[in-house]
Amino acid sequence: STAIDVHGGSSSRAAPRSAVDDLCNSLGDHYVTPDMCVSALCIDHSCRSARGLPELAVLATRLTVTNATVAKASIESALAHAKDAKGKKVMRSCLQLYVGAVPRLQWAARSVAAGRYSGVSEVLEAACWHVSAECINLAGEVALPKENSEFFFMAYIVQAVVDWVKLSIGH
């Protein structure tokens, strides 16, 4: 008998699953679909060569720092170009949230890289819900840079990844 590979053709064996596929297929309880997970983590093409869960957690937290830094820069730019007082106030408030979050996310990424998971999930949750979502709440009718929403998406997924990795490796 033959197996059908991921491209629909016939092969003598099933295509090998990568660690990222296994991880992303395990996150359903966290309301993160496999496609959402893969699309977020595989922005960095090294996702496919990651050898295991700890390496994927390091990649994920590093991507969150990058996303937060990009969102912060886009908000700085929006502040510099804001035309009205309301827009400037919103961007200034959001910028302050990101200024505080980026160092905490850097700490989280360093902790995960060192194999220490304690407190990391809480930092990711705060970044997701108390930075990005708070900016959305503050904004009202003021348009935020798209990077704020992209950061929310990444932080949400990475929190699920870190929680799953922590549970799976017993930390």
Image (spheres, rainbow, N blue to C red):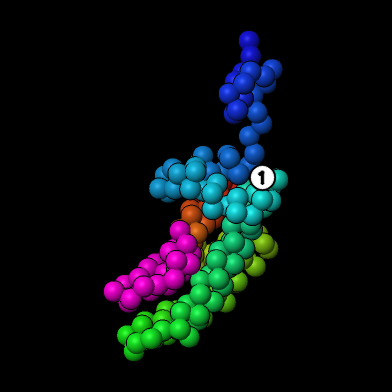
Q: Is residue 73 above or below residue 15?
A: below
Q: Is residue 8 above or below residue 27?
A: above
Using the image, determine if residue 122 lies above or below residue 104: above
Does residue 73 sit above or below 110 in this rendering?
below
Answer whether residue 35 is visible to the viewer in this image: yes
**Image quarter hosting the N terminus:** top right
Q: Which x, y percent locates residue 30?
A: 42, 49
The magenta segment is 125-153
Q: Nearer the viewer, residue 50 or 170?
A: 50
In the picture, the quarter occupied by the C terminus is: bottom right
* Corner quadrant of residue 148: bottom left
- Relative to residue 22, is residue 29 drawn left or right? left
In the picture of the structure, the residue carrying the numbered disc 1 is 48
Q: Residue at x 63, y 34 (%)?
A: 17
- Does 129 lie within the magenta span? yes
Q: Residue at x 54, y 77 (%)?
A: 73
Q: Main secondary structure of the magenta part?
A: helix
Which amino acid, mark 1? Arg
Left or right of residue 124: residue 52: right
| Residue beneath the point at 32% across and 85% down | 86
Q: Nearer the viewer, residue 37 or 143?
A: 143
Residue, far left: 141
Q: What is the count of numbered marks?
A: 1
